[in-house]
Amino acid sequence: MDQLPNLGREQEMLSIMGLKSIDQLFSNIPDEVRRTEPLPLPPPQSEEEIWRDAQHLLGSNINLDSRPSFLSAGLSRNFVPTMVGMLATRGEFLTSYTPYQAEVSQGMLQAMWEFQTMISELVSLPISNVSMYDASTSAAEAITCAVRVHNKKATQKETIYISELVPPHRMSVIENYVQGAGINIQILKHDQNGHLDIDSASIANGSCAVYVEQPNSFGILDEGLLKLKELIGDNTALIVGVDAVSLGIVSPPGEWGADIVVGEGQPFGIGPTFGGPIYGIFACTDKYIRQMPGRIVGQTHDSNEKMAFTLTLSTREQHIRRHRATSNICSNETLIALMGAMHMSLLGPDGITVLSQRVAASTEVTKKALQSIKGVELVHPNSHNFRDFVIKLPGDSGEAVAFIDSKGVMAGLPLGQWWSEMSSCLLIGCDERTSESDISSLVSAIKEWIKEVEF
């Protein structure tokens, strides 16, 4: 190529494209959406300066493990064994993506298959996929999957029933999924104890699906749900969202009629990580396998009759037939899910039981401690809880959280952020790391705030 005139790099590239200016390059972008003013960015920096500024910004974040924390609301503080990180960062796992070529991906495929097996055993259903993005996408995909299986009339708007206690962020994802699919959402009510109004739930019989959570967003374990499948019948899918850790001591949904089980896998394998990356679990009965989202690893035998693993039923994936795709999940969270499998393997069945017992015990001890504070009420005093429970304060819970935070304790989620009528309520979350010292710090801070409110 002939030597170009001594122009700046920008002009050199423009000249090769036959353009005179950057404005000409972007002339096809409408003026009303173009930024005319430069971004308020600092001048160029050295690596040292960038690192210093990054550390300053990161230092403003508060680590959940740096102080007593009672913040849960769907993502849980947990302890992940060091071995999980050591194994997950091995090159054969860390650099893997989609194992389309089974002949060179047997190790990764077997690890994924082991994850599926663990999830199936945990929820007591025969089939699991490799993972979803999170619990919310799992729930939404489960609903649309159930509609595809139970669709009565393609020209008629199909109906699903959802518990009113599904948290707003999850409901938002579900609504985004169903709005373009012609699916009608109806709400199932709960009583003053936070339990599903089981007598009125029979109205869902004949619909495509019912979605409930056990425990629900208030941490309530609802014994009435064990009868729900009997009420809604075999032609309506029962979809249950779970706290995966609770299944160490709580009856798995597959044993009481669930057709699809979804949930957050995050407590196994990875911390809350500010909401991501995490992974969702999805398991189902045989009836839903051909409509379920995500990827499935199957176990088979090769031409020499040796055990082999491969992706199976992958025509659901968008890389095969995008115009006929049954799922909006075009990838998954394989590495994070494998970290969950590693964590579960290290715990073993007995370890998972002990872990769930620790969480349940810390929940009960914290409930009793807060219940003893004058001015604090348990919103659902007759319920059994796992991980989360709700207290009512003599004032705005958002203001209480700000005050308690100033005392070095993260108190929980002000429920006014979810439902305005619960502005005086606080969702307290516990975990296996909740200590007596943490509980004492929370109790002291709440007592101090109540004194401030009274005066």
Image: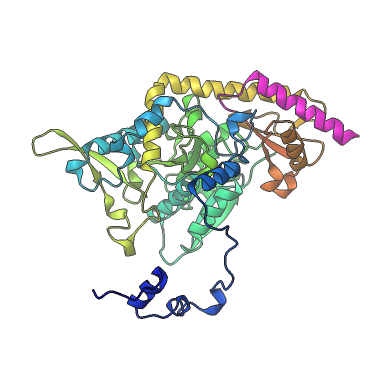
Name the residue rendered at 57%, 68% in the picture.
38
Could you say which is closer to the camera, residue 67 or residue 161?
A: 67
- The extreme left residue here reads 304
Could you say which is closer to the camera, residue 221 or residue 223?
A: 221
Whether residue 279 can be seen here: yes
Q: Quadrant of the C terminus?
A: top right
Name the residue rendered at 19%, 38% in the picture.
300
Could you say which is closer to the camera, residue 183 or residue 85?
A: 85
Give left or right: position of 45 versus 121: right
**Range covered by the magenta-colored residues:** 431-455
**Residue 306 is inside the magenta segment:** no
Identify the image quadrant of residue 224: top right
Name the residue rendered at 81%, 29% in the picture.
448
**Residue 439 is inside the magenta segment:** yes
Q: Position of residue 364 (x, y in %)?
A: 64, 23
- The extreme front residue here reads 6
Is the magenta region chiefly helix, strand or loop? helix
